[in-house]
């Protein structure tokens, strides 16, 4: 706090803070009223108020905008962001001044309690990062007579946080403001247009501290829309002597009631257009905020969503993520080289403000490292599990969306989707469109939804589809019914038993895990017998490609095979895996893919994952298997019919 007061003193320059001014500023930042300040200091409340008024006036002159006790946090936050912008544009020229301001203001933030990211970022919180030129454009547009601003984005992108700052900015200009959140309306309010519009008018009246005189202006003969218009024009707008900003949040709640939306939304459009002709309506400035996950068949010429200015919310850039990390108190983010560690976070989350903030919050708590957070991000053990499940539920409610998302995440290249489906997935924030070509919005979504697809695919394959009945003997069988390949039980025992011996040899050990691509589709199309013949044929081909006498091959599970290669480095294992992939493809086991819209491939192929380690006390067979499985998953994510090496254990050598 002491550094913060010094920073404010630098802003005032010619009018340094005295002890009483510092006291009032300190107490104001802590949320104390003038009465509470006086009670604890021995000064009279009138004197404290006079000191405060002069302080806000001095700060207003120094900063070039109106400052008050209520908005001091917001103004200082905005000032800091401008200093950050200047520093980024000219670091050498502004380094000293930025450093001083940063130290005072940011330390105040980081020493404060950080709440779990949830809901809009409070006005007083510097954890809101501007996304230039977004804020300045919105602030400028709200000054225009009769303006209509539309802020739209998927959930948790910062719509309400921006709206609150637009409202606060309007208040600093002396505007009247009304903010309605349609989530607060009871379901009964939406039973008729009449009831909804009366609720709407009463709420606006109350926030303007005006008695609701609806019955004086409401006329059933003219209808509720005309009555609502007359009420605004003849009463509300006449009573205010300044522009009125009417902010409508969570408007998608209205979308869920087409009988209301088809009249209410065109009414807002009509009001906006009347401002071009009538001075009274120029007082009204509309801000419409809605999430993009809800859809209704609105006609474009009847809704307000093709007029005014639309402001979609952009993702955070790497520089903005670095600024936010500093405000969360991650000191290492101040160093440019060390801050590059944030690049994988920004890339994986696609700059999503909520996902980034959640990560930084957990890093601030020192619950995990950044690397651990990213590794678990797309798994049920990760910090995003609830957010991802919510998105999955939305997709599962519409099979066409789920099918399209599967196409997007299971190939490495962009894919072309049906225009309506693509629009919906983009509106949900799940994909990005480049013309007609779609790709996942971020790597987190690619990883998570491809994992879900693979899980469902495996669940749809009967455990007995590709296996003969196992022997009932309790003795460990060293072979299974599929072409005398070692079974998984023996394979695991072999790894555990030999691990100690491999440690003494200090040599490289590689594991290849191979899976037949889209085998379920092949088996469903060609039948069980054809599936068994093909599985046997591919298994023999893999075995023949293993030229090492010490190699051990296993029918891993279902459509998977694995091979353990002692004394084999990673580059050699990759060559063996590529040879296996080519040999299987050359078998040319034909597939009839027409019913699957072009996929899978016209012949059976395999995907292979490789992991290499030097056995030691720091690793284990389970770690090697997990690394190879992860590599196999990555191979599938890249589009299948390829080889991927997981070097995590190899790099630790």
Image: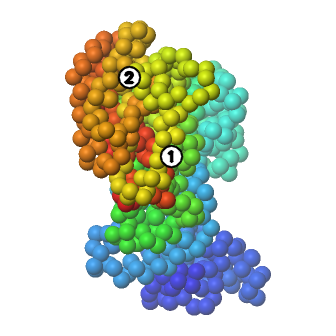
Give the residue displayed 35% in from the left and 24% down from the top.
539
Query: Could you say where residue 236 lies in the image, as x and y percent from the top left?
Result: 60, 44
| Vertical arrangement, residue 278 with respect to residue 651, above or below | above
Place residue 308 in its image quadrant. top left
Q: Residues within 10 Å of mark 2 (few under 14, many from 20)?
A: some
| Vertical arrangement, residue 528 with respect to residue 237, above or below | above
Considering the image in quadrants, where does the N terminus appear? bottom right
Place residue 542 in its image quadrant. top left
Seen from the viewer's position, the closer of residues 309 and 119 is 119
Considering the image in quadrants, where does the C terminus appear? bottom left
Give the residue displayed 47% in from the left and 20% down from the top.
481
Q: Coloring scheme of the render?
A: rainbow
Query: Could you say where residue 27 lies in the image, as x and y percent from the top left?
Result: 65, 78
Seen from the viewer's position, the closer of residues 543 and 10 is 543
Lateral position of residue 196 relative to residue 330, left or right = right
Give the residue displayed 54% in from the left and 60% down from the top.
368
| Vertical arrangement, residue 104 with respect to residue 218, above or below | below
Q: Residues within 10 Å of mark 1 (few under 14, many from 20)?
A: few
Query: Could you say where residue 21 lies in the image, as x and y percent from the top left?
Result: 60, 85
How far apart marks 1 and 2 lie (CA) works out to 34 Å
Seen from the viewer's position, the closer of residues 352 and 165 is 352
Lateral position of residue 225 relative to residue 550, left or right = right
Can the viewer see residue 54? no
The residue identified by callout 2 is 518
Lateral position of residue 87 relative to residue 303, left or right = left
Q: Tell me the SS state at disc 1.
A: helix
Can the viewer see residue 567? yes
Give the residue displayed 54% in from the left and 48% down from the top.
382
Q: Tell me the SS state at disc 2.
A: loop
| Vertical arrangement, residue 49 with respect to residue 519, above or below | below
Q: Which mark is residue 497?
A: 1
């Amino acid at each position: 706090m002491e550094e913060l007061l010094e920073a404010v003193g630098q802003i005032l320059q010619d009018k340094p803070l005295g002890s009483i001014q510092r006291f009032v500023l300190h107490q104001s930042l802590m949320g104390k009223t003038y009465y509470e300040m006086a009670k604890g200091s021995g000064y009279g409340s009138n004197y404290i108020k006079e000191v405060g008024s002069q302080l806000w006036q001095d700060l207003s002159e120094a900063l070039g905008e109106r400052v008050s006790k209520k908005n001091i946090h917001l103004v200082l936050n905005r000032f800091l962001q401008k200093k950050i912008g200047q520093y980024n544009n000219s670091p050498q020229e502004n380094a000293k001044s930025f450093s001083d301001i940063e130290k005072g203001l940011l330390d105040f933030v980081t020493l404060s309690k950080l709440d779990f990211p949830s809901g809009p970022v409070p006005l007083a919180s510097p954890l809101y990062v501007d996304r230039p030129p977004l804020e300045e454009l919105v602030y400028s547009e709200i000054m225009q007579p009769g303006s209509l601003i539309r802020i739209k984005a998927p959930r948790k992108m910062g719509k309400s946080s921006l709206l609150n700052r637009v409202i606060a900015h309007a208040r600093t200009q002396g505007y009247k403001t009304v903010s309605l959140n349609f989530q607060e309306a009871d379901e009964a309010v939406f039973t008729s247009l009449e009831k909804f519009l009366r609720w709407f008018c009463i709420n606006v009246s109350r926030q303007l501290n005006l008695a609701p005189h609806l019955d004086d202006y409401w006329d059933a003969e003219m209808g509720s829309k005309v009555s609502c218009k007359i009420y605004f024009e003849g009463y509300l707008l006449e009573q205010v002597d300044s522009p009125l900003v009417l902010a409508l949040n969570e408007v998608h709640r209205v979308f869920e009631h087409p009988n209301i939306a088809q009249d209410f939304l065109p009414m807002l459009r009509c009001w906006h257009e009347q401002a071009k002709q009538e001075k009274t309506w120029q007082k009204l400035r509309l801000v419409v905020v809605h999430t993009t996950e809800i859809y209704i068949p609105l006609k474009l010429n009847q809704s307000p969503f093709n007029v005014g200015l639309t402001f979609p919310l952009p993702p955070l850039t790497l520089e903005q993520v670095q600024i936010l990390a500093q405000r969360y108190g991650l000191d290492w983010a101040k160093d440019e080289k060390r801050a590059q560690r944030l690049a994988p976070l920004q890339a994986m989350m696609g700059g999503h403000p909520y996902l980034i903030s959640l990560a930084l919050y957990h890093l601030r708590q020192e619950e995990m490292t950044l690397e651990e957070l990213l590794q678990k991000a797309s798994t049920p053990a990760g910090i995003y599990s609830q957010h991802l499940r919510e998105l999955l539920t939305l997709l599962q409610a519409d099979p066409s969306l789920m099918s399209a998302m599967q196409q997007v995440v299971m190939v490495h290249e962009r894919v072309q989707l049906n225009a309506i489906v693509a629009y919906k997935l983009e509106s949900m924030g799940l994909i990005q469109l480049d013309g007609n070509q779609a790709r996942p919005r971020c790597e987190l979504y690619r990883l998570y939804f491809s994992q879900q697809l693979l899980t469902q695919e495996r669940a749809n394959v009967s455990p007995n589809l590709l296996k003969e009945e196992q022997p009932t003997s309790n003795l460990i069988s060293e072979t299974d019914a599929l072409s005398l390949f070692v079974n998984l039980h023996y394979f695991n025992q072999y790894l555990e038993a030999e691990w100690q011996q491999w440690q003494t040899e200090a040599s490289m050990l590689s594991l290849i895990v191979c899976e037949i691509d889209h085998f379920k589709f092949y088996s469903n199309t060609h039948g069980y017998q054809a599936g068994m013949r093909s599985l046997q044929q591919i298994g023999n081909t893999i075995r023949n490609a293993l030229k090492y006498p010490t190699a051990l091959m296993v029918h891993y599970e279902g459509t998977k095979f694995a091979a353990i290669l002692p004394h084999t480095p990673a580059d050699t294992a990759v060559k063996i895996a590529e040879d296996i992939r080519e040999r299987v493809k050359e078998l040319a086991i034909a597939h009839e893919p027409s019913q699957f819209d072009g996929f899978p491939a016209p012949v059976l192929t395999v995907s292979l994952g490789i992991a290499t380690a030097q056995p030691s006390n720091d690793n284990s067979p389970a770690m090697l298997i997990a690394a190879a499985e992860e590599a196999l998953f990555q191979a599938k994510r890249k589009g299948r019919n390829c080889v991927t090496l997981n070097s995590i254990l190899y790099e630790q050598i």
